[in-house]
Image: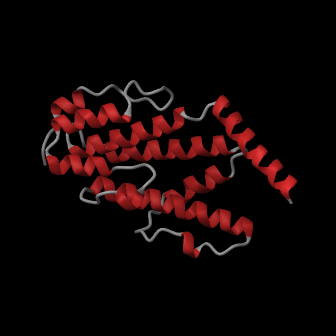
């Protein structure tokens, strides 16, 4: 496995409670200029949202997909049960992970969607701590970094202003639907 001393050492530290000092596109630019093509293709496939498009060529990605897929399946099951609908057609076909359901149940108990999202992101962050163990200057370290950076970018989009803006749009759509009915 190739070592990427320059790429890893040039990246700023990521902290769950702070905005990232680098954007995903800047990170990808560093990766494009320092990684071999095969590894760049793998890192390019790493996505917080599109699990089915990720290259499963590394153990870190396989473990991430198993955990994240299990987490999402558990959330689907919890929501389906509360709505009295069948969950089967919405589930990912993945190798299950025994630790992820607890994180989903914990988040599902939260009082607000924002608190639930933060609980899920913290659980993801802790998993990434585990996945990073023993990886210092290799592709796996960069995969973990990419996922963390995506978590932080996504988290930074949750602002009061955007929340109010989205609420107003939804509220206006509901009012319009009621008027038309």
Among the 4 quarters of the image, the one containing residue 97: bottom left
Q: Residue furthest front?
A: 180
Count numbered badges in the picture.
0
Kindly identify the residue that appears in the image at 34 percent across and 49 percent down: 46
Q: Position of residue 58 (x, y in %)?
A: 25, 56
Among the 4 quarters of the image, the one containing residue 6: top left
Whether residue 89 sits left or right of residue 33 in the image: it is right
| Front one among 169 and 102 | 169
Q: Position of residue 143 (x, y in %)?
A: 30, 45
| Front one among 179 and 160 | 179
Q: Is residue 49 above or below residue 84?
A: above
Kindly identify the residue that appears in the image at 71 percent across and 42 percent down: 169
| Front one among 55 and 16 | 55
Q: Is residue 136 above or below residue 46?
A: above
- Location of the C terminus by quadrant is bottom right
Among the 4 quarters of the image, the one containing residue 94: bottom left
Q: Position of residue 82 (x, y in %)?
A: 73, 65
Kindly identify the residue that appears in the image at 38 percent across and 43 percent down: 147
């Amino acid at each position: 496995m190739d070592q990427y001393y320059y790429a890893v050492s040039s990246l700023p530290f990521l902290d769950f409670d702070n905005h990232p000092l680098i954007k995903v596109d800047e990170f990808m630019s560093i990766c494009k200029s320092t990684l071999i093509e095969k590894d760049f293709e793998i890192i390019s496939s790493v996505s917080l949202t599109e699990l089915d498009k990720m290259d499963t060529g590394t153990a870190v990605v396989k473990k991430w997909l198993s955990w994240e897929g299990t987490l999402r399946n558990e959330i689907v099951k919890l929501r389906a049960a509360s709505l009295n609908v069948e969950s089967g057609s919405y589930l990912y076909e993945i190798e299950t992970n025994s630790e992820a359901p607890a994180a989903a149940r914990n988040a599902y108990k939260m009082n607000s969607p924002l608190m639930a999202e933060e609980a899920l992101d913290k659980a993801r962050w802790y998993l990434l701590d585990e996945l990073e163990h023993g990886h210092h200057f290799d592709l796996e370290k960069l995969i973990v970094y990419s996922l963390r950076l995506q978590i932080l970018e996504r988290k930074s989009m949750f602002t009061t202003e955007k929340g109010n803006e989205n609420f107003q749009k939804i509220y206006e759509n509901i009012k319009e639907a009621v008027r038309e009915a």
